[in-house]
Amino acid sequence: MKAINNILSSFEPISLNQMDEVKLMNRTDTKFVFEYSLLEKVIEEIKAHYYVLDIDGVRLNAYRSLYFDTKDFKFYFEHHNGKKNRNKVRYREYINSGLCFLEVKKKNNKGKTIKERIKVAKIPDSLTENGNRFVHQIMGRDDALVPKHWNKFSRITLVNKHIKERLTIDIDITFEAEERHSQLDNMVIAEVKQEKVNYASTFMRVIKKHGVRPFRISKYCMATASLFPILKNNNFKPKFLKINKLQDD
């Protein structure tokens, strides 16, 4: 971790306010999963082309999210069964900045991710009346949602200097639900966020050079399948095989 922080210290910084120009709330996401041992090499190779989010001198920021679903896991099964138009609902706390939001993420049949959110003071134990109203307004339906599990991780946020692109790099990913706990060891989830896929991305070029290809993964679904193993997860088994291999390497 010290080596990663040393490399991040050599990036040019960008502030939260400056990042407003690249919010990308309506976007295309391309995800990559690779072993932690490769991260140092990758960020060293791309550092001249990206700014790093800096919050009061911290460049590896802590996040935590509380995810919601219906009692019978409707959102989870929509994803598992390949439904094109699907939703996620969560509270997310950006710990280092002190910001907290209720967020609704919609994935449409064109592969676009659309995120809507409202600011809240803190993460409550359940959806508030105002939160339920916001979710219903965005989703257009009135599902009874309950909290399912926590997702915690550390994130590096980079902004491309040359094209409209944000890159998030997540490590130390853990999932928790009551007494159950799951952790993704020795692996990195990187996500390139763009208005539409642009292979001029320096990160995409570098990660391809290292033999890493795009890999569709949902932290919510991986957490749900790990913490609630009685749920059907056949369609996710190839993903679990790759994740387990990374963690065993």
Image (cartoon, helix red, strand yellow):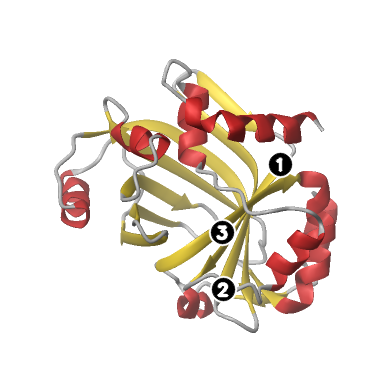
Could you tell me which secondary element the residue under label 2 belongs to?
strand
Circles 3, 1 touching at the beta carbon (< 8 Å): no
* Amino acid type indicated by mark 3: Thr
Could you tell me which secondary element the residue under label 3 belongs to?
strand
Residue 81 drawn at (x, y percent): 38, 35
Residue at (56% x, 73% y) in the render: 165
Residue 95 drawn at (x, y percent): 51, 52
Residue at (26% x, 26% y) in the render: 71
Quarter of the image holding residue 100? bottom left
**Mark found first going from the N terminus, 3 or 2:** 3
Q: Kindly identify which numbered label has been placed on residue 165.
A: 2
Could you tell me which secondary element the residue under label 1 belongs to?
strand
Residue at (57% x, 69% y) in the render: 166
* Amino acid type indicated by mark 2: Glu
So how many labels did they put on this image?
3
The front one of 83 and 248 is 83
Residue 196 drawn at (x, y percent): 49, 72
- When the figure is inspected, residue 63 is found, relative to residue 196, above or below; the finding is above
- When the figure is inspected, residue 109 is found, relative to residue 56, above or below; the finding is above
Per the image, the residue denoted by label 3 is: 30
Q: Distance between the residues labelled 2 and 1?
A: 23 Å
* Residue at the extreme bottom of the image, as rendered: 162
